[in-house]
Amino acid sequence: MASSITLKLVSAILVCIVMTASHTEAAMTCGTVVSTLVPCLSYLRGMGSLTTMCCNGVRSLNNMASTTPDRRITCSCLKSTASQINNINFDNAAALPSECGVNIPYEISLSTDCSTVE
């Protein structure tokens, strides 16, 4: 009888582990990335200075992208969005994280391979 209870307990634990593992996928969406960085658009186009609202968005986005899948989605979204917006100043884009006091594990550039972001 004890082995039956132990087997049920181990099975329940394994089910919980499997369910938890399947829910650890990325929670970040491209819509979140874009909406968070809207205050940075004039700076990224070289048409305005860096604002507090922009840096707050950069810091918020960095805090939200806490897992490797989230950072990869964020990277891919930044690349995709930047390629669709006219007049992006890529020097400003690359400098944005450090200008806002944030360290990210990749460069914001169209040539960044987001699949290697950790």
Image: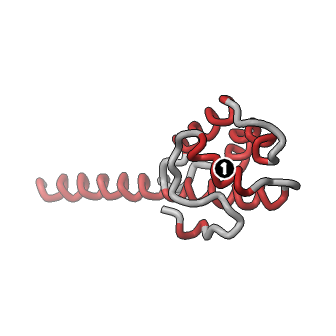
Q: Position of residue 115 (x, y in %)?
A: 57, 69
Residue under pointer 1: 29
Q: In which quarter of the image is residue 73?
A: bottom right
Q: Quadrant of the N terminus?
A: bottom left
> Residue at the location (69% across, 52% down)?
93
Q: Quadrant of residue 77?
A: bottom right
Q: Which amino acid does label 1 sit on?
A: Thr
Q: Where is residue 26 in the image (x, y as percent from the top left)?
A: 55, 54
Count of marks placed on residues:
1
Instruction: Please indicate whether residue 35 sits to the left or right of residue 100 in the image.
Output: right
**Is 30 located above or below residue 113 in the figure?**
above
Instruction: Please indicate whether residue 83 sits to the left or right of residue 20 in the image.
Output: right
**Is 110 located above or below residue 21 in the figure?**
below
> Residue at the location (42% across, 52% down)?
20
Give the class, few, some or many, for how many residues have Cα within 10 Å of label 1's Cα (few <14, many ≥20): few
**Helix, strand or loop under label 1:** loop
Instruction: Please indicate whether residue 14 sits to the left or right of residue 69 in the image.
Output: left
> Residue at the location (75% across, 36% down)?
49
